[in-house]
Image (cartoon, rainbow, N blue to C red):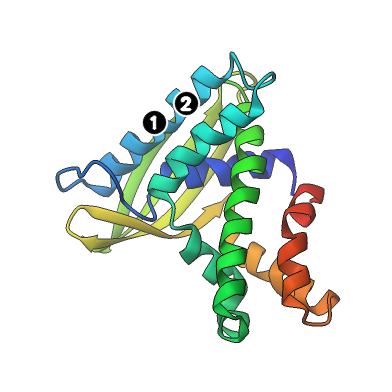
Amino acid sequence: MSNRRRFLASLLLGVSSLFSAGVVFAEESATDFAERTSAELVEILDKAQGYYKTDPDKLHTEIGGLLDEVVDFKGIARGVMGKQYFKEATDAQKAAFADTFRLSLIKAYSQALVGFGSMKIDVLSAKGPSDQKQTVDMLAKSLSDGTTVSVRYSMAAKEPGDWIVRNMIIEGINLGQTYRSQFSSSMSQNNGDMDTVIANWSEAEEGN
């Protein structure tokens, strides 16, 4: 995976809330929700410009703290494994992959994100068949080189105003499908040895 795509994937993870925690906000619209969470991410990245090269662990901790509040890593990992492999996996393997997946995302994506320098995120529109399901379109722009990227994610409400993101698409690339394909391919290459696939996941991601 290129640095540009890592940046985009991270951006989506940062601005989306797959699992609300901490402060409870009044019933938010999908647009208001996206604007609030994206502002939190941008604030972290702006501050990190002054220290990330000398203290990358601090950056990982800051980004990880945000993502732990807004991302359902276990749910994402389950989708990446797919129904077949998730059903075959032991509870220990499921937990191990969720942890490995979380760490690989935080490390790789926080570095890719901050490397783009200052940015702005515009929420363009939210639409959908009901107030329980919405598709949100956004435009991310790097202020250092002017790169713009279209992003889209599908949201559902666990209850009114309590949004979760079900899928993420970056420039037409479906992230869930991409990672699921990678996991399936790795299982085939390793003759179905799930422990090896899990152990090597971080190294495989860093090499893409």
The reply, left or right, for residue 68 in relation to residue 5 is left
Is 171 drawn above or below residue 51 in the view shown?
below
Quick one: which residue is furthest to the front in this view? 92
Residue at position x 36%, y 38% in the image: 37
User: Which amino acid lies under the numbered mark 1 shown in the image of this protein?
Assistant: Glu
Q: Position of residue 129 (x, y in %)?
A: 27, 66
Q: Could one spot residue 173 in this view of the protein?
A: no
Q: Which residue is mark 1?
A: 40
Q: Residue 156: which quarter of the image?
A: bottom left
Quarter of the view holding residue 59 = top right
Residue 23: x %, y % from top left? 24, 41
Check disc 2 and give the amino acid type. Ile
What residue did someone put label 2 on?
44
Q: Would you say residue 59 is visible in this rendering?
A: yes
Q: Nearer the viewer, residue 206 or 179?
A: 206
Horizontal side of 5 relative to 76 (left or right) equals right
What is the number of callouts on the image? Answer: 2
At x 80%, y 79%, the residue is 188
Mark-to-mark CA distance, 1 and 2:
6 Å
Residue in the foreground of this view, choosing between 122 and 91: 91
Q: Secondary structure at mark 2?
A: helix
Q: Dot 1, how many residues are within 10 Å of its Cα: few (below 14), some (14-19), or many (20+)?
A: few
Is the C-beta separation of discs 1 and 2 under 8 Å?
A: yes
